[in-house]
Image (cartoon, rainbow, N blue to C red):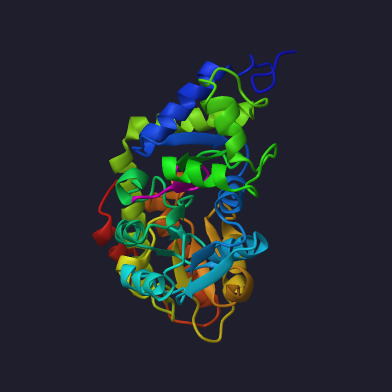
Amino acid sequence: MTHPFLDLAPLTAAHFAAIERRVASLLATEQDVVITQGEALLPLEGCVRGGAAPGSTALNVVTGPYGQTFGNWLRDCGATVVDLTVPFHTAVTADQVAEALATRPEIDFVSLVHAEAATGNTNPVAEIGEVVRAHGALFMLDAVASVGAEPLLPDAWGVDLCVIGAQKAMGGPAGVSAVSVSPRAWARLTANPRAPRRSYLSLLDWKERWIDGGRKALPHAPAQLEMLALEACVERIESEGLDALMARHALAAAATRAGASALGGGLEPYVRDAADAAPVATTLRAPDGTDASELVTQALAADPSLPLIAGGGALAKEMIRVNHYGKDATRGTVLSSLAALGAALADTGRRVDLEAARKAVSDTWPSE
C-alpha cells in the first residue's frame, strides 16, 4: 500500500537549493542562507558556538527567556558576557545598547531576540543594528518569532547571523529552520578554532560541503517532510503576500490588546507600551489574586484548540499568552480567546464586559 507521506522520491540537491532561494527571497537577503535540519535552537546554538570563543566579549541583550539561554551558551564558550537586561514588560532601546557598547569597547559579538513570543515584546532591530554596525561587532539576531509577523530585513539592518523558524507566524513546520550568514560572519566562524566542525551544529560544514561546492551535493539526507512543508509554507506566504501576512498579525495584536483592555475583570496588557508589543503574540497580566495558569486551564476547558497558554517558569502565575500567530492570526480566534478568558474570569466572581470587548475588537479589526 502506498502512502503519500512515506512513498516519496528523495529530495534532490536542486530542489533543496530552490527552497533555499525562496527563503532568501522572503528575507530580502543577498547573504548565504543555510536551511538547517532541526528546530531553530539548532542554528541558534551553532551561531553562538561559532561566533564566540575565549577572548571574545559578548553583549547579550535579555528581554525574555531566550536571551537568558544565549548568555548561558556564550559563557559555556568561554566568552566574557555582558548582560543588558531590561524588564520583560518593555523593549530594549538603541540608546541602551549604544551605552553598553561605549562602556565596554572590547565587545565584538552582540546577541538579540527580535520578538520574544514568551514575553510579548519586540525590539527595534533597525536602530540597534545601526549602533552595532558602527561599533564593529558581529550581530546575531533570533528572528524565529518575528519572521512573517513584522518587517525583517537582515541585510539593510546589518544583521550578520539571522535565524528564523517556520513554526510561528509563517505557519509552517517546527522541525526545520534557517540562518542567513554575512561574509563577516563566515570570516569570524572560519577564524574561530572552536567553531563546531564535523558536527550537527556546524554551519561551516554546510559552507564547505554545500555552498562552496556549488550546492550540488547535500552534506546528509535532508528532513524531507519538513522541507516539503517549508516549501508549502513559503508558497502560501507568497500567495497571500508578505505585507498582507504582516498586516494580519498586526491587526490580531492590536485587536487582542484593545479587547483585553475593554474586557475588564482586572485583565491588562503585560507589555505596557503598545509600540513595544510584538505582533506575534499578546501577553496579558492576570488580575491580582488570580493564578494565570488556572485561568488558562479554565478558559481551555470549553475549547482546547484556543491559542492560550500561561507564562513560563516564574511567570506562570501572572502571565497569560494569546499566541495569535500563523493560522491563529484571525479575528475569530481573537474574539474566541477573549470570550473564553472572560468566562474564566467571571467564574472567579469578577465583573467582565464581553460586549465591550467584542466592540473593541470590531472597532480595531472591522473585517477580514
In the rendered view of the protein, which quadrant contains the N terminus?
A: top right
Q: Is residue 101 magenta?
A: no
Residue 190 percent across, percent down from the top left: 55, 42
Residue at the farthest bottom position: 289
Is 252 rendered above or below residue 269?
above
Question: Which segment is the magenta one?
Answer: 158-171
Q: Residue at x 58, y 37 (%)?
A: 204
Q: Is residue 307 visible?
A: yes
Magenta stretch: dominant secondary structure:
loop
Question: Quadrant location of residue 121?
Answer: bottom left
Residue 212 percent across, percent down from the top left: 52, 26
Residue 162 percent across, percent down from the top left: 45, 47
Is 226 rendered above or below residue 92?
above
Residue 220 percent across, percent down from the top left: 67, 26
Is 231 rendered above or below residue 166?
above
Residues 165 and 337: in front is 165
